[in-house]
Amino acid sequence: MPCPLEHPDVEARLSHRQWVIGLHWNGVCPAYPANELEKAGGLVRDRTGDQEVLVQHLPADGLFIVRDVRGEVVPAIAGYWFVRHACHPETGLYRS
């Protein structure tokens, strides 16, 4: 899917260069900002559609890990907020 080079976040929900982990899973496109995951202690349990996911951020290693409640890895992409928002303007944003 092509992404526009510019797609302003008119709500200014995050700094353009904020690092996020984004999902496109179970019909939902949430994004989890690294700083919000850190505020929550590095591990968050959240609902995406009708399923729960565990989102983990290990800042010392630069890793994000996303699993379902059975422990299976959920596909996710880490990147800057401006890229995520340009490709998925409907993205929901996790706040701790």
Image: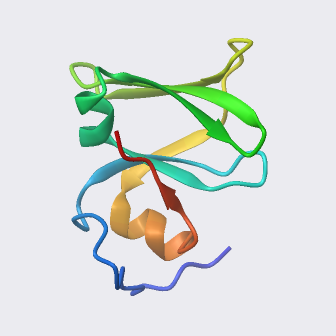
Q: Is residue 19 left or right of residue 75?
A: left
Is residue 6 positioned above or below 91 on the image? Answer: below
Q: Indicate the quadrant containing the N terminus: top left, top right, bottom left or bottom right.
A: bottom right
In the image, 27 versus 49, the foreground residue is 49
Residue 33 drawn at (x, y percent): 34, 46
Is residue 92 positioned above or below 57 on the image? Answer: below
Residue 42 drawn at (x, y percent): 33, 22
Is residue 69 positioned above or below 36 on the image? Answer: above
The colour scheme used to paint the residues is rainbow
Is residue 62 positioned above or below 76 on the image? Answer: above
In percent of the image, x 36 and y 79: which residue is there?
A: 9
In percent of the image, x 38 and y 48: which residue is there?
A: 20
Q: Disc count in the image? A: 0
Q: Indicate the quadrant containing the C terminus: top left, top right, bottom left or bottom right.
A: top left
Residue 61 drawn at (x, y percent): 27, 20
In percent of the image, x 34 and y 79: which residue is there?
A: 11
Quarter occupied by residue 16: bottom left
Q: Is residue 84 left or right of residue 9?
A: right
Q: Is residue 38 left or right of residue 4?
A: left
Quarter occupied by residue 60: top left
Residue 34 drawn at (x, y percent): 30, 40
